[in-house]
Image (cartoon, rainbow, N blue to C red):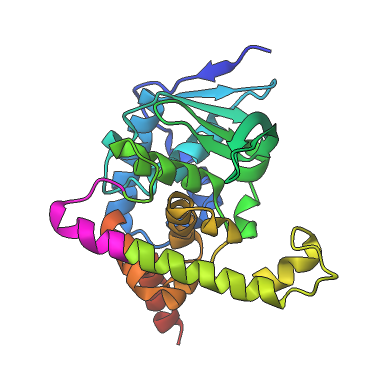
Amino acid sequence: MPLRWFRRTSRGIADDLWAQVLQSQPLVGHLGAADLTRLRALVDGFLAEKHISGGAGFAPDALVQASIALQACLPALNLGLRAYADFVEVIVYPDQFLVPRRRTDDAGVVHEGIEALAGEAMDGGPVVLSWADIGPGSHETGGNVTIHEFVHKIDLLDGEADGIPPLPAGRHARWVRLLEDTYDAFCDALEHVEAQIPRSVDPESAAADRYYEALPLDPYAATDPSEFFAVSGEAFFVTPVRLRSAYPEWYQALSDFFGQDPAGAHDAEASSIR
């Protein structure tokens, strides 16, 4: 079935639609009025520059487009749309989509198969998303697929998916050190958790979830440094206090990079309630 695409006019997002999107996105609670104004301008620019396409019969309406644009623009708030200059298309499927995979293991054996994905960011190509995994209520899972995939796009700005986005020379060495140290620490934590799972419990089953809940990040973060950056990047916006508690130096590095401090806003809110 052909893709359907829609494009926002140069007039920008309407006031009532913007209010509706903000109400549906708890991720922006740490932003003040000035930052929200800048975010709105960035969303307008994103919707004007990018094509929001629907696959498998899915037709992204104005609310879907604006919701995706807001989540995509949040990590780029202080980076600008140049962070997304290598693509023009965002493809949205109604549910998870199937992609062929080819992998060569350490023994040189080639494995081929089909994998169901909730999102994918292609180097120099589109971002593909599953509305079932990014729509209303999806934030309750503790993750954010949209932010995850757009952090991958930021990572790919220098042409490599390695967890190291373009950085000023003075910050590059510290970022690499913190990435390596924190990634290793998380992998060690994952190994410790996996060692606690009884042999009678399938580590891939729902019965194992209660063991993985002890981790500050989704286990997928241990895949490689690129996925660690993407998973911790989404956690920075979704569960910032937990991330900061587990890895304060890495949280600060992300805060410096994104130019935002979601955990600090939570601290201020908690103090005002006391």
Residue lying at the far front of the rendered structure: 107
149 vs 48, left or right, is right
56 vs 250, left or right, is right
Which residue is drawn at the image coordinates 43% and 49% (left, top)?
A: 226
Residue 267 vertical placement versus 30 (above, below): below
Name the image quarter holding the C terminus.
bottom left
Foreground residue, 201 or 22? 201
Which residue is drawn at the image coordinates 60% and 16% (left, top)?
A: 3
169 vs 40, left or right, is left
Q: Is residue 174 magenta?
A: yes
Foreground residue, 79 or 107? 107
Would residue 134 be seen by someone viewing this image from the given angle? yes
Which residue is drawn at the image coordinates 69% and 22% (left, top)?
A: 56
Would residue 214 be seen by someone viewing this image from the given angle? no
Residue lying at the far bottom of the rendered structure: 274
Residue 90 percent across, percent down from the top left: 49, 28
Residue 50 vertical placement versus 79 (above, below): above
Which residue is drawn at the image coordinates 63% and 32% (left, top)?
A: 101
Residue lying at the far top of the rendered structure: 2
Name the image quarter holding the N terminus.
top right
Q: Is residue 166 magenta?
A: yes
Residue 13 percent across, percent down from the top left: 41, 33
Q: Which residues are magenta?
A: 165-177
